């Protein structure tokens, strides 16, 4: 992803199925694309975890969400959308969120998010 002038970084610490987690992202200033990191800092105790909102997206657009890189080989509880990506309204993704894979401690997935309209 190109770093656009005025792009903004979003990040927050959170609870991911009973374990601390971190999500970070860079969203283009015009909201056309974003890259998010979802990382598990500890062991989850519940699965599936609650959906994860992706902050900073334009609620009036729809977005294609897919893995930016292949998931790590040991990931044995992927989210359903990970096989081929998913297109969802920005209002939904930024408030309700997307389903999360069962991440191992100290592992992450990178998401590429691209506006489709």
Image (tube, rainbow, N blue to C red):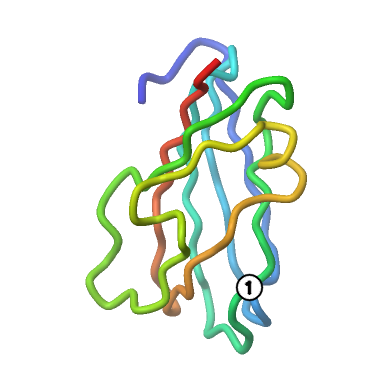
Number of numbered labels in the structure image: 1
Report the residue marked by disc 1: 49
In this rendering, the answer to whether 62 lies above or below 41 is above
Nearest to the observer: residue 20 or residue 102: 102
User: Is label 1 in a helix, a strand or a loop?
Assistant: loop
Left or right: residue 31 versus residue 105 is right
- When asked about the image quadrant of residue 10, the answer is top right
Nearest to the observer: residue 21 or residue 72: 72
Residue 18 drawn at (x, y percent) = 68, 82
In this rendering, the answer to whether 49 lies above or below 96 is below
Residue 112 drawn at (x, y percent) = 41, 38
Left or right: residue 67 versus residue 96 is left
Residue 91 drawn at (x, y percent) = 74, 33
- When asked about the image quadrant of residue 70, the answer is bottom left
* Location of the N terminus (image quadrant): top left
In this rendering, the answer to whether 14 lies above or below 70 is below
Residue under the point 35% across and 48% down: 84
* Location of the C terminus (image quadrant): top right
Residue under the point 59% across and 15% down: 29
Nearest to the observer: residue 9 or residue 62: 62
Left or right: residue 94 versus residue 101 is right
Residue under the point 69% across and 64% down: 14
- When asked about the image quadrant of residue 30, the answer is top right
Residue under the point 45% across and 37% down: 35
Looking at the image, the residue that sits furthest to the bottom is: 45
Task: Say few, some or many: other residues with alpha carbon within 10 Å of mark 1 (under 14 / 14 to 19 / 20 or more).
Answer: some
């Amino acid at each position: 992803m190109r770093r656009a002038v005025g792009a903004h970084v979003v990040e927050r610490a959170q609870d991911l199925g009973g374990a601390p987690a971190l999500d970070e992202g860079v969203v283009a200033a015009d909201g056309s694309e974003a890259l998010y990191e979802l990382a598990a800092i500890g062991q989850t105790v519940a699965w599936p975890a609650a959906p994860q909102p992706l902050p900073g997206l334009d609620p009036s657009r729809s977005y294609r969400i897919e893995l930016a890189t292949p998931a790590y080989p040991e990931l044995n509880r992927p989210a359903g959308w990970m096989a081929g990506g998913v297109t969802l309204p920005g209002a939904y993704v930024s408030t309700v969120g997307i389903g999360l894979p069962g991440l191992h401690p100290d592992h992450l997935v990178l998401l590429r998010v691209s506006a489709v309209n």
